[in-house]
Image (spheres, grey):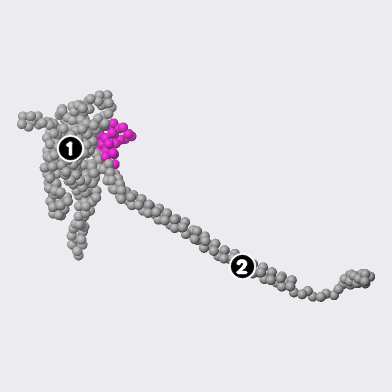
Amino acid sequence: MLAAVRLDFDPTTTALGTAVRLDMLALAGVIFLVLVITGLRAGRAGAAASIDGAEAARRLRRDDLILIAFGAVPGAVIGGRLGYGLIHLDYYRTDLNALFDPGRGGMELTLALLLGSLTAISVARLLAAPIGRWLGVAAVPLLVALGLGKLTMVLGGAGQGLYSDASYATLYVRPGPWGSANADIAAVPAQALEGSLVLAVLVAVLVVPFLLRLRFLERSVIVRPTLAPRRDWAMLTGGRRFLTVLGLWAVARFAAVFTWRDAHVLGPLAAEQIVLIAVMVLAFGGPVFVAGRRQASVVVPAWLAMRRERRARAAGIARSEAAAEPEAEAAEEAPEVEEAEKADQAKGATDARAAQEAAGAAEAPKPETEPTKSTKATRRRRRSATDTHS
């Protein structure tokens, strides 16, 4: 079995007669580097806007960068302490005042990043700066800060992970003071692992769009690489770029947390991972929700207007049908009435002819009939009676 990596150096140094920790010096250098990169990117973004003639897109002022960076500090401090209190809730529940004592405990990065970003955005809003463009400019420098910042923790012995006897495990030989407990015992370098994953995300964000533009043109035997026209990816443009970077960082940190010493609070997940899941949902699902809401704000009123129009049209058709129904019924009844009248007229004509025929028959002379025997006897009696009287 291979031995662990042994780190043998003093965590402090002397500068101008004052003892200074190496990790703090390195972190200050990282912050300075990030501010320089952000300033350079802000200048390039303003130059590109002026070249394109987009006057509506204001040039990013570099002096605003200092104010925005200072504006992120109070949010980062408050968020860091709140996040640390949430992760170690069992400890701070017994003594809530300890949460306001920076000497007891540390800072949590995830909520520090979120609240720091919110306070920085608030300052940018007060300065009337283009917030979306500043977020797009700050996305790559943010990954640089998060990746290199984690690597600086190696100089202070902070962020050591699970104890391990693997060949890549690290231990600190000198007594310190170190940032992790039991730094002299071999453990997984969780801080270095997280920093490496974040820097890998940075490389992916920079390289993948370039590779997607790469094209190869074949001319006879020679193959010439060329680039397709630049395309503004929705996920890597403006404020959406910042959210994408934030979500990818959360994914990298989520994977690194499995090597931490923190207790599991939900199955195999630590409290930090639950917070990171919320960050991923916000980063990846937030733009989708906003886009869907914007589309719904256009589609839903149009659908409602169409629905009202259809209802009005249906009501008009119903009124027209209701008005035309009596006429239709009259038109349907007219042939029957006409046939009844014709039948009555025919019956009347028939009755009239029958009456005329009956009247003619009554006026016509009756034909003489041969008298019967009884009639003849009656006539003889009458005649004999007449003779007797005479």
Q: Secondary structure at mark 1?
A: helix
Q: Which of the pair 168/133 is nearer the observer?
A: 133
Identity of the residue drawn at 21% across and 27% down: 100
Of the 4 image quadrants, the one containing the N terminus is top left
Q: Which of the pair 204/109 is nearer the observer?
A: 109
Return the residue at label 1: 72
Q: Residue furthest front?
A: 390
Q: Which mark is residue 93?
A: none
Q: Which picture quadrant has residue 106? A: top left
Q: Is residue 79 visible?
A: yes
Identity of the residue drawn at 69% across and 71% down: 356
- Asked if residue 140 is among those painted magenta in the image, a careful observer would answer no
Give the label, 2 or 1, closer to the camera.
2
Q: Earlier in the sequence, mark 2 or mark 1?
A: 1
Q: Which of the pair 373/294 is nearer the observer?
A: 373
Number of residues whose C-alpha sits closer than 10 Å to that of mark 1, classed few (under 14), some (14–19) or many (20 or more): many
**Which amino acid, by three-letter code, is at mark 1?**
Ala
From the top left corner, tell me how far across and down residue 42 is, in percent: 14, 46
- Asked if residue 270 is among those painted magenta in the image, a careful observer would answer yes
Q: Is residue 287 above or below residue 99?
A: below
Q: From mark 2 to mark 1, how far is it between C-alphas? A: 104 Å
**Which amino acid, by three-letter code, is at mark 2?**
Gln
Identity of the residue drawn at 69% across and 69% down: 355
From the top left corner, tell me how far across and down residue 210 is, in percent: 20, 52
Q: Residue furthest right?
A: 388
Badge 2 vs badge 1, beta-carbon distance below 8 Å: no
Q: Is residue 377 above or below residue 27?
A: below
Q: Which residues are magenta?
A: 256-281
Return the residue at label 2: 345
From the top left corner, tell me how far across and down residue 203 is, in percent: 19, 46
